[in-house]
Image: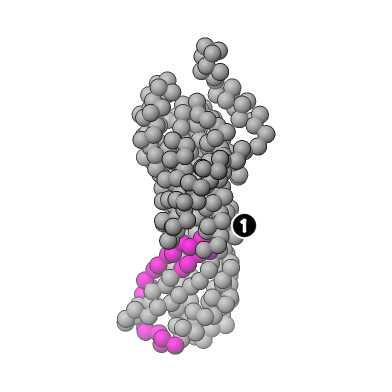
Amino acid sequence: HTSAGRIPTDQGYRHFVDSLDAVKPLSAPERRAIERVLSGAVDLDDVIARAVRALAQITQQAAVVQYPSLQRVSLRHIELIPSGAGRVILVIITEAGRVEQRTLALARDVDAEDLASLGRCLNAELTGLRLADLALPLASLAEAAPARLHEVLDVVGTAITEALRADAEERLVMAGAAHLSRHSVDFARSISPVLDALEEQVVLLRLLAAMQDGVSVSIGEENPYEELSEASVVSSTYDVAEQSVARVGVIGPTRMDYPGTMAAVYAISRYLSDILSNR
């Protein structure tokens, strides 16, 4: 308490956070505000952008929302579209609504009817599987397919592998960094290292990846990066079709409203789970 004459230590904040019995629910106005912001979203990019803005607005801190990982999500649909001589457009749509598109170069043209038939076969066999688990089913399909379609299946498998490899550089969206300037007095040394860390997506992604499932709090020197030794990170996983796929989080000074921030982070994660699982 401020009347004690000093700011609590990281250990003091940790004791307080660990003593919380449960994440308190948001107030009715806060819930309505989130529903109002997220209800009009038209696609995945819009959902993520609206969610991070809502979280930053509610907490008055810097907020981050990670895109669903292709490694973890399941396949909803594959489309093969002929695109001129020796070209096929591969469209991958995930259960989270994420769309990946690749242009495939083939040694020879493939009949449009063959492509349509192959697309139906791929969807019948692969829909509902995680993208990271498609290699073996694709190999089985290639063995059973006519020789004229082997090249297409081989190129499709390579394109999916490359998409997953590219996804290793996962991305997130941030909002509300300017809010931290209002809390600059809460950073004993300087707010600059925190702002510098927020500009490095790799740092934030690694930090989120190291946090525990569910609602998790990392306080001050518990953070593995010195730039964030005066900051706290509150994050939570969100799910698509009951599979944890990514995280949302808030970064602010160690002297923050932990119960309120944890409630907001958890609420946004649940809204994301519901919206993306029902798209």
Which sits in the foreground, 166 or 143?
Answer: 166
Q: Which residue is mark 1?
A: 242
In the rendered image, residue 198, in percent from the top left (x then y), is placed at 40, 38
In the rendered image, residue 9, in percent from the top left (x then y), is placed at 54, 20
Where residue 135 sits, quadrant-wise, is: bottom right
In the rendered image, residue 78, in percent from the top left (x then y), is placed at 48, 73
Which sits in the foreground, 268 or 154?
Answer: 268
Q: Can residue 39 be found in the magenta stretch?
A: no
For the point 54% across and 75% down, which residue is it? 123
Which sits in the foreground, 212 or 235?
Answer: 235
For the point 51% across and 60% down, which residue is it? 96
The residue positioned farthest toward the right in the image shown: 21
In the rendered image, residue 182, in percent from the top left (x then y), is placed at 38, 28
Q: Quadrant of the N terminus?
A: top right
Residue kind at label 1, given as amino acid type: Glu
For the point 37% across and 71% down, which residue is it? 103
The residue positioned farthest toward the left in the image shown: 85
Q: Which residues are magenta?
A: 92-113
Secondary structure under tag 1 reads loop
For the point 41% across and 56% down, which residue is it? 46
Q: Is residue 71 something one can see in this rendering?
A: no
